[in-house]
Image: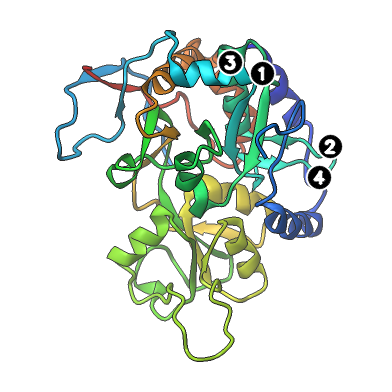
Amino acid sequence: MTGVKDWAARGRLRGWGGVTGMAVACALTASLTLLPLSHGGADPFGVNTAGPGAASALPARADACTDPEASLPPSSAGGPSIEKIRKRGKLIAGVDQNSFRWGYRNPDTGTLEGFDIDLVRAIAGNILGDPDAVIFRAIPTNQRIAALEHDRVDVVVRTMTINCKRLDQVSFSTAYFQAGQQVLAPKESAITGYDSSLKGKRVCTAEGSTAYEALEKQSYGAVFKDESDGTERDKDQLTVPNQLDCLVRLQLGEVDAVVTDNALAAGQAAQDPAVVLKGAPFTTEYYGVATKKGANDLVARVNAVLDDYRRGGKDSDWMVSYRAWLATGLPGIEAPPAPKYRSN
């Protein structure tokens, strides 16, 4: 995985330069998210974690999805998706550019950095022999699946939770991170977590997120849906295109809390020490690399990359990237989640 340790080491030395600067950077990056981002050339196309353990082979899923984290066995073989990337000479990756420590634009250098960005570079290094052979496309949360369906990107590496509903639309690699939904709120707030303390509170989530789906199932009386009241009210007040917009809403006092993955929320708490995670995670979720539905050769290749990425114990590329970006906000993780594979 050429270059992964170097990129992670460089990232440890950089910061946002203060909460005020972070808030300004957040607002600016949120407004730029729809712009295509490139690296190395112009765009030619316009919680606790699971401990270490052996990979397990599982039967192929039937019509009923019972184990969404089970993916195709790893393979270094070629195929139509791999050849398309090689012919182009670039991997096109859908990423975030405003999730601190995961995928964000460093305000000092203008480069994209973070845990997800390290993984993208590892995939490019494996397929193309060059971790910099990447075209980054910044995509909002609610456009991740559409970007794959319309061939705007080859992969989405953007804290995307693997679940049965999404497997109807895209394909996923094995899990590369374990997270859970949690509540983010001001330190002085009376909100105590995902419980009755949310009653009557304005809660922000990202459109198309698993946080929104969780609130649909159990809201505890929280106000989380944007509903027309016949005025010029901002329809994206509570349900926003990008998750970072929720932090801005919270900082401005327009909402009382945010529900999101604790992995993302930890980065936001690092950006603004006035907010904290409340209560415990109330779900267990796994992030995967998403591809277009049926791009089996690419899924198998990414799984091979992830096998290498996890290998090496505390010196693995995965652990190096974790220590560089996430250990401060999510301490105590000793290993990546073990992969699960289908039998065919």
Q: Which mark is residue 131?
A: 1
Tags 2 and 4 touching, CB below 8 Å: yes
Point out residue 70 in the picture as x, y percentages from the top left corner: 28, 27
Q: Which mark is residue 86?
A: 3
- Say which amino acid is labelled 4: Pro
Tags 2 and 1 touching, CB below 8 Å: no
Tags 2 and 3 touching, CB below 8 Å: no
Ranked by sequence position, the earlier of labels 2 and 3 is 3
Q: Secondary structure at mark 1?
A: loop
* Position above or below: 111 against 263: above
Q: Secondary structure at mark 4?
A: loop
Ranked by sequence position, the earlier of labels 1 and 4 is 4
Mark 4 lies on residue: 107
Mark 2 lies on residue: 109
Residue at the far right: name it.
Answer: 108
Instruction: Please state which of residues 40 and 206 is positioned toward the viewer in this rendering.
Output: 40
CA gap between label 2 and label 4 equals 6 Å
Ranked by sequence position, the earlier of labels 2 and 1 is 2
- Position of the C terminus by quadrant: top left
